[in-house]
Amino acid sequence: MAERAGLTTKTLRFYEQAGVLPVPTRTAAGYRDYDESALARLGFVRAAQAAGLTLAEVRTVIEVREDEGPPCEHVTALLDRHAAALDERIAELKATRAEVRRLRARAATLDPAACREDGVCQVLPTGTPAATQPPATAQRPRTTGR
């Protein structure tokens, strides 16, 4: 089954422990004996992970399916939460990119010879009011805002 699913046997055992793959029957020799439904379940797990769902969330989807029937509303709610989290993360990354660009522009105005001995690098201000301002010998770049 692992080979057919493109996974390792260790991953299959992990999915069993995580509760997203049912414990299979065993052969007389003690080997796991998965049926075809396991392959479909593995396909679902991979698709759910590709959409950003965690294994814990996948497990809840499976539980809803088993207890209540089609979990479409539950999956839709999970996807809505993930989309909102992604939107928030994208906003954070854009703000970080703007700050990096601001610092890079600031760096172009600084004189390395004016770097203070008590600091590490004047390009990255340390948060004190004096540290956030460029030295008097350097000009601050003009910006139109963030």
Image (tube, helix red, strand yellow):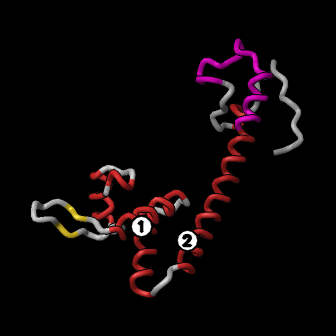
The reply, left or right, for residue 21 in relation to residue 145 is left
Q: Is residue 105 magenta?
A: yes
Which residue is pictured at 27% across the width and 58% down the height? 13
The reply, left or right, for residue 41 in relation to residue 137 is left
Part of the protein shown in magenta: 100-121
Residue 9: % across, % down = 28, 52
* Residue at image mark 2: 78
Tell me the quarter of the image containing the N terminus: bottom left
Among the 4 quarters of the image, the one containing residue 45: bottom left
Kind of residue at disc 1? Ala
Which residue is pictured at 83% across the width and 28% down the height? 140
| Numbered disc 1: secondary structure | helix
Which residue is pictured at 46% across the width and 59% down the height? 46
Residue 101: % across, % down = 75, 35
Residue 114: % across, % down = 72, 16
Q: Judge by depth and name the residue closer to the eye, 142 or 92.
A: 92
Cα separation, mark 2 vs mark 1, equals: 21 Å
Q: Judge by depth and name the residue closer to the eye, 71 or 100.
A: 71
- Of the numbered discs 2 and 1, the one sitting upstream in the chain is 1
Q: Which mark is residue 40?
A: 1
Kind of residue at disc 2? Leu
Q: Is residue 116 magenta?
A: yes
| Numbered disc 2: secondary structure | helix
Tell me the quarter of the image containing the C terminus: top right
